[in-house]
Image (cartoon, rainbow, N blue to C red):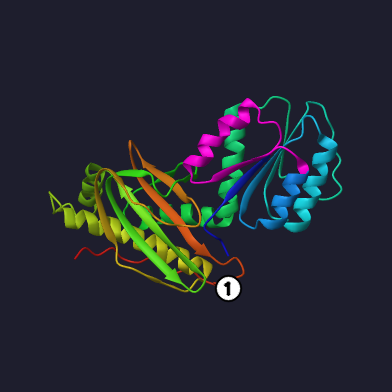
Amino acid sequence: MIVKKYLLIFVGSGRDELLHLTPHLKALNFEVGWIAQSEQAREVLSSADCLSLVLIDATDTAETERGVVSFIRERQPRLPIIWIQRKGAVPIFSGPPPDVILQGHVEPDVLTAVAATLLRERFYTRGLVDDLVASVVGIGRESFGTELTPADPVLKSTTEQISGLSTLLYFAGSGVAGHVIAGAAPEYLITLHQRLLPNIAKPTLEQLADLLGELANQVVGRLRSQHGLVFDVGAPLLVRGANVVVRQVAGSPALLVSFHDGPSRIDIELCLHRFDERLTVRQVTSSLPPGELVFL
Protein backbone atom coordinates (compact mmCIF):
# COMPACT_ATOMS: atom_id res chain seq x y z
CA MET A 1 0.00 0.00 0.00
CA ILE A 2 1.49 3.36 -0.96
CA VAL A 3 1.52 5.84 1.92
CA LYS A 4 1.52 9.60 1.65
CA LYS A 5 5.00 10.49 2.86
CA TYR A 6 8.12 9.65 0.92
CA LEU A 7 11.63 10.10 2.17
CA LEU A 8 14.80 10.00 0.11
CA ILE A 9 17.99 9.25 2.01
CA PHE A 10 21.51 10.17 1.04
CA VAL A 11 24.31 8.27 2.73
CA GLY A 12 27.60 10.00 2.12
CA SER A 13 29.52 13.23 1.93
CA GLY A 14 27.15 15.57 0.12
CA ARG A 15 29.16 16.37 -2.98
CA ASP A 16 28.10 19.03 -5.45
CA GLU A 17 26.25 16.62 -7.74
CA LEU A 18 24.23 15.39 -4.76
CA LEU A 19 23.35 18.93 -3.77
CA HIS A 20 22.28 19.60 -7.35
CA LEU A 21 19.84 16.68 -7.18
CA THR A 22 18.04 17.89 -4.04
CA PRO A 23 15.93 20.75 -5.52
CA HIS A 24 14.72 18.50 -8.34
CA LEU A 25 13.43 15.98 -5.81
CA LYS A 26 11.86 18.59 -3.56
CA ALA A 27 10.04 19.98 -6.60
CA LEU A 28 8.34 16.57 -6.85
CA ASN A 29 7.27 16.84 -3.18
CA PHE A 30 9.87 14.40 -1.90
CA GLU A 31 11.32 14.99 1.52
CA VAL A 32 15.10 14.74 1.20
CA GLY A 33 17.05 13.37 4.17
CA TRP A 34 20.81 13.39 4.60
CA ILE A 35 22.62 10.81 6.74
CA ALA A 36 26.38 10.91 7.17
CA GLN A 37 27.05 7.62 8.96
CA SER A 38 26.08 4.07 8.08
CA GLU A 39 24.87 3.31 11.62
CA GLN A 40 22.40 6.18 11.40
CA ALA A 41 21.27 4.83 8.04
CA ARG A 42 20.60 1.41 9.56
CA GLU A 43 18.52 2.98 12.30
CA VAL A 44 16.38 4.91 9.84
CA LEU A 45 16.04 1.97 7.47
CA SER A 46 14.87 -0.23 10.34
CA SER A 47 11.99 2.08 11.25
CA ALA A 48 10.98 3.72 7.96
CA ASP A 49 8.67 2.01 5.50
CA CYS A 50 8.03 5.00 3.26
CA LEU A 51 11.39 5.29 1.50
CA SER A 52 11.50 5.78 -2.25
CA LEU A 53 15.19 5.72 -3.06
CA VAL A 54 18.55 5.41 -1.32
CA LEU A 55 21.66 7.01 -2.77
CA ILE A 56 24.97 5.84 -1.28
CA ASP A 57 28.17 7.80 -1.77
CA ALA A 58 30.79 5.10 -1.19
CA THR A 59 33.82 6.89 -2.62
CA ASP A 60 35.53 6.98 0.79
CA THR A 61 34.11 4.11 2.84
CA ALA A 62 33.03 1.42 0.40
CA GLU A 63 33.58 -1.45 2.82
CA THR A 64 31.23 0.01 5.42
CA GLU A 65 28.60 1.05 2.92
CA ARG A 66 28.46 -2.40 1.30
CA GLY A 67 26.98 -3.57 4.58
CA VAL A 68 24.25 -0.95 4.22
CA VAL A 69 23.30 -2.39 0.82
CA SER A 70 22.91 -5.87 2.32
CA PHE A 71 20.93 -4.40 5.20
CA ILE A 72 18.54 -2.69 2.77
CA ARG A 73 18.11 -5.77 0.58
CA GLU A 74 17.17 -7.89 3.58
CA ARG A 75 14.47 -5.49 4.77
CA GLN A 76 13.24 -3.73 1.64
CA PRO A 77 14.39 -5.78 -1.36
CA ARG A 78 12.52 -3.62 -3.90
CA LEU A 79 13.87 -0.29 -2.66
CA PRO A 80 15.98 1.28 -5.47
CA ILE A 81 19.63 1.98 -4.65
CA ILE A 82 22.14 4.20 -6.45
CA TRP A 83 25.79 3.48 -5.58
CA ILE A 84 28.61 5.97 -6.32
CA GLN A 85 32.18 4.64 -5.99
CA ARG A 86 35.74 5.59 -6.83
CA LYS A 87 36.71 5.22 -10.46
CA GLY A 88 38.13 1.77 -11.11
CA ALA A 89 36.87 0.26 -7.87
CA VAL A 90 35.37 -3.24 -8.07
CA PRO A 91 32.94 -3.69 -5.16
CA ILE A 92 31.84 -7.15 -4.12
CA PHE A 93 28.35 -7.43 -2.62
CA SER A 94 27.22 -10.39 -0.54
CA GLY A 95 23.70 -10.18 -1.97
CA PRO A 96 21.89 -8.42 -4.84
CA PRO A 97 23.89 -5.36 -5.95
CA PRO A 98 22.57 -1.80 -6.16
CA ASP A 99 20.25 -1.01 -9.06
CA VAL A 100 22.72 1.50 -10.55
CA ILE A 101 26.49 1.75 -9.96
CA LEU A 102 28.22 5.00 -10.96
CA GLN A 103 31.96 5.67 -10.86
CA GLY A 104 34.07 8.73 -10.14
CA HIS A 105 32.75 12.21 -10.80
CA VAL A 106 29.14 12.06 -11.92
CA GLU A 107 27.69 14.96 -13.89
CA PRO A 108 24.71 16.45 -12.03
CA ASP A 109 22.38 16.04 -15.01
CA VAL A 110 23.34 12.37 -15.32
CA LEU A 111 22.65 11.70 -11.65
CA THR A 112 19.35 13.54 -11.83
CA ALA A 113 18.28 11.51 -14.87
CA VAL A 114 19.23 8.21 -13.20
CA ALA A 115 17.34 9.11 -10.02
CA ALA A 116 14.30 10.27 -11.99
CA THR A 117 14.17 6.98 -13.92
CA LEU A 118 14.40 4.83 -10.78
CA LEU A 119 11.76 6.90 -8.99
CA ARG A 120 9.43 6.75 -11.97
CA GLU A 121 9.71 2.97 -12.08
CA ARG A 122 9.24 2.84 -8.30
CA PHE A 123 5.77 4.40 -8.60
CA TYR A 124 4.77 3.44 -12.14
CA THR A 125 5.99 0.10 -13.49
CA ARG A 126 7.26 -0.13 -17.04
CA GLY A 127 4.29 -2.30 -17.96
CA LEU A 128 1.83 0.32 -16.72
CA VAL A 129 3.67 3.14 -18.52
CA ASP A 130 3.85 1.14 -21.75
CA ASP A 131 0.12 0.37 -21.51
CA LEU A 132 -0.69 4.04 -20.95
CA VAL A 133 1.38 5.15 -23.95
CA ALA A 134 -0.04 2.44 -26.21
CA SER A 135 -3.58 3.28 -25.09
CA VAL A 136 -3.28 6.98 -25.89
CA VAL A 137 -1.62 6.32 -29.26
CA GLY A 138 -4.39 3.83 -30.07
CA ILE A 139 -7.13 6.23 -28.98
CA GLY A 140 -5.61 9.00 -31.10
CA ARG A 141 -5.55 6.76 -34.15
CA GLU A 142 -8.90 4.97 -33.73
CA SER A 143 -11.12 7.64 -32.16
CA PHE A 144 -9.54 10.94 -33.16
CA GLY A 145 -8.02 10.12 -36.53
CA THR A 146 -4.57 11.40 -35.69
CA GLU A 147 -1.11 9.93 -35.17
CA LEU A 148 0.34 10.87 -31.81
CA THR A 149 4.06 10.57 -31.05
CA PRO A 150 4.84 10.08 -27.33
CA ALA A 151 7.66 11.88 -25.56
CA ASP A 152 9.58 10.28 -22.70
CA PRO A 153 7.40 9.84 -19.58
CA VAL A 154 8.44 11.99 -16.62
CA LEU A 155 7.37 12.48 -13.03
CA LYS A 156 5.75 15.76 -12.07
CA SER A 157 4.47 17.37 -8.94
CA THR A 158 0.75 17.24 -8.24
CA THR A 159 0.86 20.96 -7.40
CA GLU A 160 2.34 22.27 -10.66
CA GLN A 161 0.61 24.84 -12.80
CA ILE A 162 -1.32 23.83 -15.87
CA SER A 163 -2.38 26.05 -18.74
CA GLY A 164 -4.82 25.91 -21.61
CA LEU A 165 -7.82 23.60 -21.36
CA SER A 166 -7.79 20.42 -19.27
CA THR A 167 -10.19 17.75 -18.06
CA LEU A 168 -9.74 16.13 -14.66
CA LEU A 169 -11.19 12.66 -14.14
CA TYR A 170 -11.15 10.81 -10.82
CA PHE A 171 -11.44 7.06 -10.33
CA ALA A 172 -11.59 4.96 -7.16
CA GLY A 173 -12.28 1.39 -6.17
CA SER A 174 -11.07 -1.45 -4.01
CA GLY A 175 -7.37 -0.92 -3.41
CA VAL A 176 -6.90 1.70 -6.10
CA ALA A 177 -7.65 5.41 -6.55
CA GLY A 178 -6.27 8.16 -8.71
CA HIS A 179 -6.92 10.68 -11.43
CA VAL A 180 -6.19 11.38 -15.07
CA ILE A 181 -5.76 14.85 -16.52
CA ALA A 182 -5.96 15.39 -20.28
CA GLY A 183 -4.93 18.83 -21.50
CA ALA A 184 -4.10 20.73 -24.67
CA ALA A 185 -4.09 24.22 -26.11
CA PRO A 186 -7.59 25.36 -27.17
CA GLU A 187 -6.35 26.10 -30.70
CA TYR A 188 -5.23 22.50 -31.16
CA LEU A 189 -8.49 21.16 -29.73
CA ILE A 190 -10.43 23.28 -32.23
CA THR A 191 -8.33 21.82 -35.07
CA LEU A 192 -8.85 18.30 -33.75
CA HIS A 193 -12.58 18.85 -33.41
CA GLN A 194 -12.82 20.20 -36.95
CA ARG A 195 -11.05 17.11 -38.28
CA LEU A 196 -13.69 14.93 -36.64
CA LEU A 197 -16.72 17.11 -37.34
CA PRO A 198 -15.90 19.46 -40.23
CA ASN A 199 -19.49 20.67 -40.38
CA ILE A 200 -18.95 22.51 -37.06
CA ALA A 201 -16.73 25.44 -38.00
CA LYS A 202 -16.51 26.99 -34.53
CA PRO A 203 -16.87 24.42 -31.73
CA THR A 204 -18.01 25.80 -28.40
CA LEU A 205 -16.12 25.50 -25.13
CA GLU A 206 -18.54 22.77 -24.07
CA GLN A 207 -17.80 20.79 -27.22
CA LEU A 208 -14.06 21.09 -26.65
CA ALA A 209 -14.57 19.97 -23.06
CA ASP A 210 -16.52 16.95 -24.34
CA LEU A 211 -13.59 16.12 -26.60
CA LEU A 212 -11.12 16.13 -23.71
CA GLY A 213 -13.57 14.34 -21.44
CA GLU A 214 -13.98 11.54 -23.96
CA LEU A 215 -10.21 11.21 -24.25
CA ALA A 216 -9.78 10.97 -20.47
CA ASN A 217 -12.66 8.48 -20.22
CA GLN A 218 -11.14 6.25 -22.88
CA VAL A 219 -7.70 6.36 -21.23
CA VAL A 220 -9.12 5.28 -17.87
CA GLY A 221 -11.37 2.70 -19.50
CA ARG A 222 -8.52 1.04 -21.37
CA LEU A 223 -6.27 0.92 -18.31
CA ARG A 224 -9.09 -0.62 -16.29
CA SER A 225 -9.69 -3.24 -18.97
CA GLN A 226 -6.01 -4.03 -19.56
CA HIS A 227 -5.24 -4.56 -15.87
CA GLY A 228 -8.52 -6.10 -14.81
CA LEU A 229 -9.09 -3.49 -12.09
CA VAL A 230 -12.47 -2.71 -10.57
CA PHE A 231 -13.21 0.94 -9.83
CA ASP A 232 -15.77 3.66 -10.39
CA VAL A 233 -15.11 6.70 -12.56
CA GLY A 234 -16.35 10.19 -11.73
CA ALA A 235 -17.66 12.87 -14.05
CA PRO A 236 -15.02 14.84 -15.97
CA LEU A 237 -14.20 18.26 -14.49
CA LEU A 238 -13.18 21.08 -16.82
CA VAL A 239 -10.16 23.17 -15.84
CA ARG A 240 -9.55 26.35 -17.82
CA GLY A 241 -7.20 29.27 -17.46
CA ALA A 242 -3.57 30.36 -17.54
CA ASN A 243 -1.22 29.06 -14.84
CA VAL A 244 -3.95 27.30 -12.88
CA VAL A 245 -2.84 25.07 -10.00
CA VAL A 246 -4.86 21.92 -9.34
CA ARG A 247 -3.63 20.72 -5.97
CA GLN A 248 -4.03 16.99 -5.40
CA VAL A 249 -3.30 15.30 -2.08
CA ALA A 250 -1.69 12.11 -3.38
CA GLY A 251 0.69 9.47 -2.10
CA SER A 252 2.89 9.67 -5.17
CA PRO A 253 4.01 12.14 -7.82
CA ALA A 254 2.11 12.13 -11.09
CA LEU A 255 3.28 10.55 -14.33
CA LEU A 256 3.21 12.94 -17.29
CA VAL A 257 3.42 11.89 -20.93
CA SER A 258 3.21 14.42 -23.75
CA PHE A 259 1.94 13.25 -27.14
CA HIS A 260 2.92 15.32 -30.15
CA ASP A 261 0.92 15.90 -33.31
CA GLY A 262 3.23 18.03 -35.40
CA PRO A 263 3.84 21.28 -33.51
CA SER A 264 0.88 20.63 -31.18
CA ARG A 265 0.60 18.27 -28.25
CA ILE A 266 -1.75 16.64 -25.78
CA ASP A 267 -0.60 16.11 -22.20
CA ILE A 268 -1.81 13.07 -20.28
CA GLU A 269 -1.20 12.95 -16.54
CA LEU A 270 -1.82 9.83 -14.49
CA CYS A 271 -1.59 9.92 -10.71
CA LEU A 272 -2.20 6.98 -8.39
CA HIS A 273 -3.35 8.31 -5.03
CA ARG A 274 -3.54 4.78 -3.69
CA PHE A 275 -2.58 1.43 -5.12
CA ASP A 276 -2.39 -1.84 -3.23
CA GLU A 277 0.44 -3.83 -4.82
CA ARG A 278 -1.02 -7.00 -3.29
CA LEU A 279 -4.10 -6.73 -5.47
CA THR A 280 -4.76 -9.83 -7.52
CA VAL A 281 -6.27 -8.76 -10.81
CA ARG A 282 -8.17 -10.99 -13.12
CA GLN A 283 -6.49 -12.14 -16.30
CA VAL A 284 -7.78 -10.26 -19.34
CA THR A 285 -7.91 -12.54 -22.36
CA SER A 286 -9.20 -10.04 -24.88
CA SER A 287 -9.28 -6.30 -25.27
CA LEU A 288 -12.34 -4.18 -25.71
CA PRO A 289 -13.36 -3.54 -29.31
CA PRO A 290 -12.84 -0.03 -30.67
CA GLY A 291 -15.67 2.31 -29.65
CA GLU A 292 -17.24 5.38 -31.13
CA LEU A 293 -16.77 9.02 -30.21
CA VAL A 294 -20.12 10.73 -29.90
CA PHE A 295 -20.59 14.46 -29.24
CA LEU A 296 -23.79 15.36 -27.43
Region of the chain picked out in magenta, as a range: 11-38
In terms of image quadrants, where is residue 289?
bottom left
Q: Is residue 143 visible?
A: no
Q: Looking at this view, is 82 or 259 the one in front?
A: 82
How far from the left and from the top, in percent, is residue 24?
51, 37
Residue at 75% across, 39% down: 37
Question: Considering the image in quadrants, where does the C terminus appear?
Answer: bottom left
How far from the left and from the top, in percent, is residue 23?
51, 35
Q: Is residue 257 above or below residue 294?
A: above
What SS does tag 1 mark? loop
Residue at 57% across, 56% down: 127
How far from the left and from the top, in percent, is residue 218?
37, 62
How far from the left and from the top, in percent, is residue 42?
75, 49
In-image side of 283 versus 198 (left or right): right
Can residue 37 be found in the magenta stretch?
yes
Residue at 60% across, 40% down: 115
Q: What amino acid is at disc 1? A: Gln
Q: Looking at this view, is 68 or 288 the one in front?
A: 68
Residue at 24% across, 65% down: 294
Can residue 287 be found in the magenta stretch?
no
Q: Which residue is mark 1?
A: 283
Question: Considering the image in quadrants, where does the N terminus appear?
Answer: bottom right
In-image side of 198 versus 269 (left or right): left
